[in-house]
Image (cartoon, grey):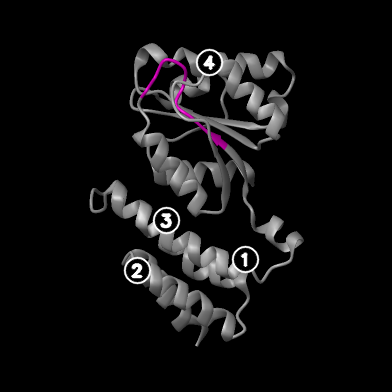
Amino acid sequence: MSQEIFDKLKSAVIELDVDAAEAAAHEALAAGLDPFEVINNGLSPAMQTISELFDEGEMYVPQILVAAEAFQNAMKILMGQLSAEEASKANRGKVIVHTVQGDIHDIGKNIVGTMLAANGFEVIDLGRDVPVDEVVRKAEELKVDIVTGSALMTTTMPSQRDIIKLLEEVGIRGNLKVMFGGAPVTKEWVDRIGADGFADNAADAVIVAKELMS
């Protein structure tokens, strides 16, 4: 019975059926299933499949947004049954996403933010062309776990290095993880400037973020 409900939930998200996802979430609760089991066996695998379809070019941004809506609505139903303490445990961490200073491209950043949120992270989206000092100020103020930043031009990549430097200067570099990406960004560059993680697509960004939080 439980596997049948897990499969319903997974299929609803992959098929972009928001109503069916909500119905499956309610059905799971009515059947007395553990919300964490439902999330781990139904919702999370669904979003992993969505990530893979996107990276293979079989799904596009508008579809991802609908899948994320189905996921998040089902999550709200399931999480509504948890205590504040249990809900806090279900949160994978607090993450800043932004496009670095001087860079106005934000499609990739938006997709990564959506995928992180759909996988249980609390996402703070600072937008695009965000000054380095603003990123660091928000990271300190909000006590985030991860800072991410995308650079879509080689001329804006140095802002990623500057973020690391300023985090060190204000004394909070050791309190959080930093991961970067973007079309011209490479793992070699990210390693050289002292960041903790690199991802070149949305699916990898979720995987790396989970690894960093573990």
Q: Earlier in the sequence, mark 1 or mark 4?
A: 1
Q: Which residue is mark 2?
A: 17
Give the amino acid at mark 2. Answer: Asp
The residues tagged by marks 2 and 3 sit, at their Cα atoms, a distance apart of 11 Å
Residue at image location 58% in from the left, 80% down from the top:
29
Up the image or down, 43 lies above or below 23; here it is above
The residues tagged by marks 2 and 1 sit, at their Cα atoms, a distance apart of 20 Å
Residue 97, position as x, y percentages in the image: 51, 34
Which residues are drawn in magenta? 96-104
Give the amino acid at mark 1. Answer: Met
Q: Earlier in the sequence, mark 1 or mark 3?
A: 3
Residue 33, position as x, y percentages in the image: 60, 80
State the image quarter where residue 162 is shown.
top right
Q: Which mark is residue 160?
A: none
Q: Is residue 107 left or right of residue 212?
A: left
Residue 110, position as x, y percentages in the image: 41, 39
Q: Is residue 204 magenta?
A: no
Q: Which residue is mark 3?
A: 68
Q: Main secondary structure of the magenta part?
A: loop
